[in-house]
Image (tube, rainbow, N blue to C red):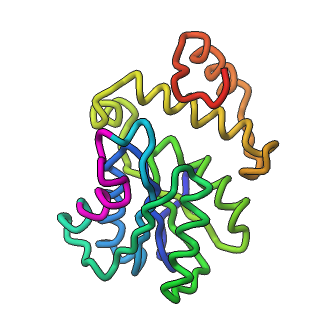
Amino acid sequence: MGHQARRCSAAIGLGSHDLGVATTSADLYGAGLFPLVVFSGGNSPTTAARFPRGEAVHYRDHALNLGVPAEAILLEPKARNTGQNITLSREVLRENGVEVESLLLISKPYMQRRSYATCRKLWPEVDVICASEPLPFGDYIKSIGDEKLVVDMLVGDLQRVIEYPSLGFAVAQDVPGDVHDAYERLRRASFDSRLISP
């Protein structure tokens, strides 16, 4: 999204297979950009083996090991998709008396646009800033250790950016023609394990 990270009322670390979300959350907390983070996520087919206790729990443990104090972390361990990440985290913040005017959404690098579009749809009154681990694409693939998984996830994420607005799950985002063409080429090349439809 190209957002400049700045101080926000709270943060949400969106669950996934990528522990870099928790690392980035710890870094941004250490920089004083938010007083409280909600780690959100249960499990999905791509995370059950990696994070058997759930994405949010493993994120919390990693952030604690990186020096984030326990009192600065809230857990939302049930979400199974991005919409639930937003709505259930919002409820956790409300239950804990946190007034949110601005929100730092921390995600995988290629998920920023979809998380932004989802949050704008489900929580339109909040000011949304997106952040992720600042890694070049090649270094990101190495950090995950599975090139096909990363490209499959990227293709699936873009499909959701394209299709979710018509389903009422997100606000529309502009997808340039060359990006759409690349998406279609990758689908035809069988980078398709994370697609929501054939």
162 relative position to 140: left or right = right
Position in image of residue 125 (x %, y %): 72, 74
**How many numbered markers are drawn?**
0
Residue 56 magenta-drawn?
yes
The residue under the point 48% across, 85% down is: 96
In which quadrant of the rendered view does residue 49 lie? top left
The residue lying toward the viewer, choosing from 2 and 14, is: 14
For the C terminus, which image quadrant? top right
Q: Which of these two is toward me, 67 or 91?
A: 91
Front in this rendered view, residue 38 or 109: 38
Find the residue positioned furthest to the bottom: 97
Q: Whole-percent x and y of residue 84? A: 58, 58
**Is residue 173 placed above or below 180 in the rendered structure?**
below
Determine if the magenta segment contains residue 55: yes
Q: Quadrant of residue 182?
A: top right
In the rendering, at what x and y percent does residue 10 appear? 48, 76
Please tell me which residue is depicted at 53% across the width and 45% down the height of the picture. 111
The region drawn magenta spans 49-61
Please say if 80 is above or below 166.
below
Q: Is residue 45 above or below residue 155?
A: below
For the point 72% across and 50% down, which residue is it?
A: 169
Residue 28, compared with residue 182, is above or below; it is: below
Residue drawn at x 37%, y 41% as measured from the top left: 47
The image quadrant that residue 147 belongs to is top left
